[in-house]
Amino acid sequence: HKVTDHLRRSRMLGSSTTGHSSRIKTAYYDILKVTPNATQSQIKTAYYKQSFIYHPDKNPGNMDATQVFSEISEAYTVLGSITLRRKYDRGILSECDVRGAGQPSSKDSTSMTPGSTQHQQKARQFTQRGGKPIYNFDAFYKAHYGEQLQREQELRAMKQRMQEMEERNTKARKQKIIFEILVTLLCASGGLIIYSLKES
């Protein structure tokens, strides 16, 4: 349902217009589920999130997901590039601009040169295989959500330790109760024996 709703919404955004230059200004933002005031970093994060959900490898045989993924990639091609995004916001973006655009760059990567280390790392993250972009989602989520995941793991470990401690305490209390009952029974038995001896 999520794929179908996304596709229906994206089609509605462009149903009354044709071509990249005539799209309403918020269409690409709506596809990535960000506002026009979003930073480049927020756009990149939204792109990774949406791509992760609708990637063809995660939705084999689902043509709707493939279509949505294509629209997400197109939206990021424009919004991920500062130059193309400015043109898009001003309503002067042409189809040639989009078609001729290379891999979009974020604000902090506009100065990368083809031979730089940053560029090589970027290229490894977006390796092409059979025309499909392969994204390093694991690295992305680890970088952005690693601290949160670590906190969750620590909380789970702490909860498990507390549960084990509670189980040990419960076991110790049960053993103490059993011991007290045994002592009481022994004392009662001893008292009865002494009383019987005195009576005899």
Image (cartoon, rainbow, N blue to C red):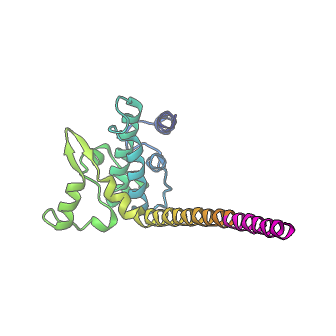
What residue is at 40 percent from the left and 64 percent from the top?
146
Q: Is residue 125 shown left or right of residue 191? A: left
Residue 187 shown in magenta? yes
Most foreground residue, 139 or 126? 139
Q: Position of residue 133 (x, y in %)?
A: 26, 45
- The chief SS type of the magenta part is helix
Most foreground residue, 116 or 199? 199
Q: Position of residue 113 (x, y in %)?
A: 17, 65
Residue 146 shown in magenta? no
Q: How many marks?
A: 0
Most foreground residue, 157 or 146? 157
What residue is at 42 percent from the left and 47 percent from the top?
50
Quadrant in the picture for the C terminus: bottom right
Relative to 190, say whether 7 is above or below: above
Which residue reaches farthest right?
Answer: 199
Relative to 17, say whether 152 is above or below: below
Place residue 180 in its image quadrant: bottom right
Residue 81 can be seen, yes or no: no
What residue is at 17 percent from the left and 61 percent from the top?
120
What residue is at 31 percent from the left and 43 percent from the top?
95
Q: Is residue 157 shown left or right of residue 143? A: right
Residue 125 can be seen, yes or no: yes
Most foreground residue, 69 or 58? 58
Which residue reaches farthest left?
Answer: 115
Relative to 53, say whether 40 is above or below: below
The magenta segment is: 179-200
Q: Position of residue 175 (x, y in %)?
A: 63, 64
